[in-house]
Amino acid sequence: MAQDIAVLDFGSGKIDVLIGERGVNNTICINGMGECDYAGFADGEWFEPDQLGYAIGHAINNAETNSRTKIKRLYVGVPGEFTTVVCRDVSISLTKKRKVTEADVDMLHEQGDVFRNNPDYTVINIGPVYYTLDDDRRLVQPVGMTSNKLGGHISYVLAENRFIHFVGKILEELGIESIEFVSSVLAEELLLFDDITRDQYVVLIDVGYITTSVAVGRGDGLLGLYNFSLGGGHITGDLAMAFGISFSQAESLKRKVVLSLNASDADVYEITDRDSRIPFPAKTVNEIVMERIKLIASTIEKCLSKCEYDYPDYIPYHLTGGGLSYLKGARDYLSKRLNKPVEIVSPSF
């Protein structure tokens, strides 16, 4: 079976490898996948770096076995915590009035890439927020338009070199011949939103198990990217600590939560442990969960307050990730705390 594309994604607590190919109508057909739980990362640091090679190798091996394909070329998603975003206004002269070409666009992007000799970061994605011509019109596709000047507001996503070198060495030792690093957050934005929606700005909140990314995007670029180490796993930890139960029991309890429930003192959530059922006061459980979501919401607000771009007040915030999306009532409570409409977003295919 011919391999079209293979992608490795670092989640908060799990590594996923997908092997697929493009189908009809811009769909994606998954031919195989592999996954492996691992300790994850927080604050830009791996919890168990010495175990990362095993986890990556296990996920890749499972994907290759399931698809009966040997991975030679791999796209690696770089999590938000290992990246930063810089936007620049760039322009070039075309010497005479003529049609803009793809080569001109590439030259414009290269003109703004001043990061080649940066010892700490490497550019992994370049995306236009918008382009401009000699009449100062803003547009998303300049190729074929007539002008004597090409400009644009260009977004550069930079990955930490220590991430690239560390992960790259592991993959080379596993026999991967070609590696390309891409921004997970930018890829997510381009996948989840169509061109029209992105041209009006998007705010994407990805709450994972341990970490959260908050991105403001427009066009094909990111305008701002902010990350912090809070997620659904912290809710589990809060419940485990409050009731003196194991982490697995707390995870089972969390999945019973319904935040829209106006719980009375008599209401309980029950989890099964071996042959017994353990009750927990629903009112107390909900209060614990809401307190953590309240903290996540306030941190999201602090992140967005750093954004220097004035995106429209009417656009909703979009929520994704496994940290909160599946919790019943979490979206509504997060919306209440942020005082903004929050919509859960997922791929359309």
Image: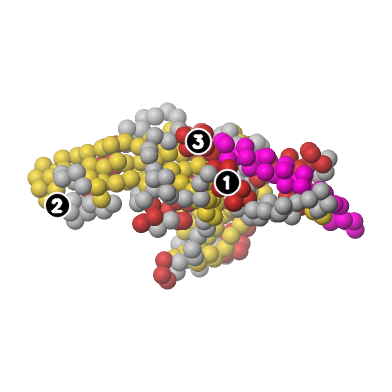
Distance (Cα) linking label 1 and label 2? 48 Å
Query: Which residue is the site of mark 1?
Result: 336
Distance (Cα) linking label 3 and label 1? 17 Å
Q: Residue at x 38, y 52 (%)?
A: 198
Q: Is residue 308 left or right of residue 239?
A: left
Query: Which residue is the site of mark 2?
Result: 146
Query: Which residue is the site of mark 3?
Result: 303
Q: Residue at x 38, y 39 (%)?
A: 310
Residue 321 within the magenta-colored segment of the rendering:
no
| Boundaries of the magenta span | 271-299
User: Badges 1 and 2: C-beta atoms under 8 Å apart?
Assistant: no
Closest to the camera, between mark 1 and mark 2, is 1
How many residues crowd mark 1 within 10 Å: few (<14), some (14–19), many (20+)? some
Distance (Cα) linking label 2 and label 3? 40 Å
Q: Secondary structure at mark 3?
A: helix
Q: Is residue 193 left or right of residue 59?
A: left
Q: Secondary structure at mark 1?
A: helix
Q: Is residue 27 above or below residue 17?
A: below
Regarding residue 88, the answer to whether it shows in the image is yes
Closest to the camera, between mark 2 and mark 3, is 3
Question: At which x and y percent is residue 197?
Answer: 39, 55
